[in-house]
Amino acid sequence: MESQNLKKLGLKATLPRLRILQLLENSPHRHKSAEDVYKALLEVGEDVGLATVYRVLTQFEGAGLVIRHHFENGISVFELDEGHHHDHLLCVKCGSIIEFFDEAIEQRQRAIAQQHHFDMTDHCLHIYGICPNCQKEEP
């Protein structure tokens, strides 16, 4: 996303915003905490404070650029909103997050909402467990 796109969202294209956006776009890990973003910026020599990272991510959330997830580990993570729905598997040991989409689950959720005459506007599904890597490490 370029600076023009930030301007379309009502955000000035400041250097911290551009750096944070580039980091989110280019990271192999889609879900990042503010602390993850801050550490990654430090690693590449960017002089951006943690408070600035929090502020920018909150601004991105308000503009609809990122989605904030509050998982049960108590840490908020952010991911770019790419316009498609998905759910999450979360490892309770290492914190890894796997995205998935299953049409049968989606259909069942819509049917349940309809059975209860509920006008569903949004939903999320988080499945907590232990990932294959952590299972290998268990005695």
Image: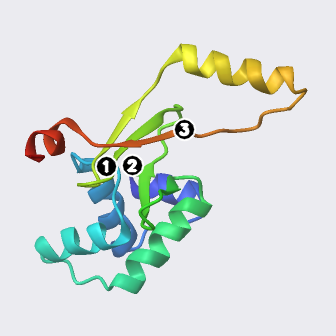
What's the residue type where badge 3 is placed?
Leu
Q: Give the number of the mark in front: 2 or 3.
A: 3
Q: Nearer the viewer, residue 1 or 55?
A: 55
Task: Using the numbered discs, state the Cα–Cα distance from disc 2 to disc 3 in whole angstroms.
Answer: 28 Å
What's the residue type where badge 1 is placed?
Glu
Query: Circle 3 is placed at which residue position?
Result: 125
Disc with the residue nearer the chain's start (2 vs 3): 2
Task: Using the numbered discs, state the Cα–Cα distance from disc 1 to disc 2 in whole angstroms.
Answer: 8 Å
Q: Residues within 10 Å of mark 3 (few under 14, many from 20)?
A: few
Which numbered tag is attached to residue 1?
Answer: 2
**Residue 128 appears in the rendering:** yes
Q: Is residue 51 left or right of residue 121?
A: left
Q: Are marks 1 and 2 in contact (CB under 8 Å)?
A: yes
Disc with the residue nearer the chain's start (1 vs 3): 1
What's the residue type where badge 2 is placed?
Met
Q: Secondary structure at mark 2?
A: loop
Q: Are marks 1 and 3 in contact (CB under 8 Å)?
A: no
Q: Position of residue 3 (x, y in %)?
A: 42, 58
Q: Is residue 112 above or below residue 22?
A: above
Q: Position of residue 109 (x, y in %)?
A: 67, 24
Query: Circle 1 is placed at which residue position?
Result: 25
Q: Residues within 10 Å of mark 2 (few under 14, many from 20)?
A: few
